[in-house]
């Protein structure tokens, strides 16, 4: 009887642990969904959309047809670096890392922002890395919430490139 009672007790503990783990996973998924839903709100969606279309065009990429959003497409820095490298080769702006993860994404964004500074984009017009890429608790990246700042950087970059005689499409305010 003691063995049967102990086995029943273990089964009950395992069931409770499994239920707690499932509840924790559901809560994490719900939190991630809520964060994703609110992560791309901005004051001027038309301006952000125009900046997104511009950087895709400069980089020789079609805007994603699957409805991928601005921040999600840019948060790893690859599209930004590739567009700038294609528009104007700059010393120190190497090929961005296509490896996944927040470390590589942040390094790509920092490289892009340094190159913008080298092109005399005013420092006050530069977004912060956290505006676009925020490291999650497990090392994954999520989109930042200040995409208007990213759009402002792209508008300023477009002006600087055109002022320096680089043939890029207009990005008018």
Image: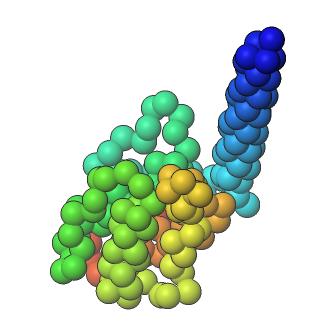
Q: Which residue does the image show at 73% across and 60% down from the upper left?
A: 43
* Quadrant location of the C terminus in the rendered image: bottom right
The residue most toward the front is 1
Judge left or right: residue 53 versus residue 26: left
Q: How many numbered dots are placed on residues in this image? A: 0
The answer to which quarter of the image holds residue 134 is bottom right
Q: Position of residue 97 (x, y in %)?
A: 28, 59
Up/down of 117 relative to 34, above or below: below
Foreground residue, 77 or 44? 77
* Quadrant location of the N terminus in the rendered image: top right
Foreground residue, 1 or 94? 1
Q: Which residue does the image show at 58% across and 57% down from the upper left?
A: 136
Foreground residue, 24 or 38? 24
**Image coloring type:** rainbow
The answer to which quarter of the image holds residue 160 is bottom left
Judge left or right: residue 103 versus residue 39: left
Q: Position of residue 90 (x, y in %)?
A: 21, 77
Q: Position of residue 99 (x, y in %)?
A: 31, 53
Up/down of 79 relative to 87, above or below: above
Is residue 82 visible to the viewer in this orientation of the structure? Answer: no
Judge left or right: residue 126 versus residue 145: left
Q: Which residue does the image show at 32% across and 64% down from the upper left?
A: 81
Q: Position of residue 16 (x, y in %)?
A: 78, 28
The answer to which quarter of the image holds residue 47 is bottom right
Is residue 88 visible to the viewer in this orientation of the structure? Answer: yes
Q: Which residue does the image show at 36% across and 62% down from the upper left?
A: 104
């Amino acid at each position: 009887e003691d063995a049967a009672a102990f086995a029943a007790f273990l089964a009950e503990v395992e069931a409770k642990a499994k239920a707690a783990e499932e509840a924790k996973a559901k809560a994490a998924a719900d939190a991630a969904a809520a964060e994703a839903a609110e992560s791309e709100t901005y004051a001027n969606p038309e301006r952000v959309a125009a900046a997104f279309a511009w950087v895709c065009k400069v980089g020789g990429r079609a805007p994603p047809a699957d409805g991928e959003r601005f921040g999600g497409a840019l948060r790893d820095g690859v599209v930004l670096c590739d567009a700038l490298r294609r528009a104007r080769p700059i010393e120190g702006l190497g090929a961005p890392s296509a490896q996944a993860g927040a470390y590589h994404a942040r390094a790509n964004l920092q490289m892009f922002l340094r190159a913008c500074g080298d092109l005399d984009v005013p420092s006050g017009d530069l977004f912060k890395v956290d505006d676009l890429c925020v490291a999650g608790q497990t090392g994954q990246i999520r989109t930042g919430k200040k995409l208007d700042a990213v759009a402002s950087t792209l508008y300023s970059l477009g002006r600087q490139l055109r002022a320096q005689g680089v043939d890029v499409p207009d990005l008018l305010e």
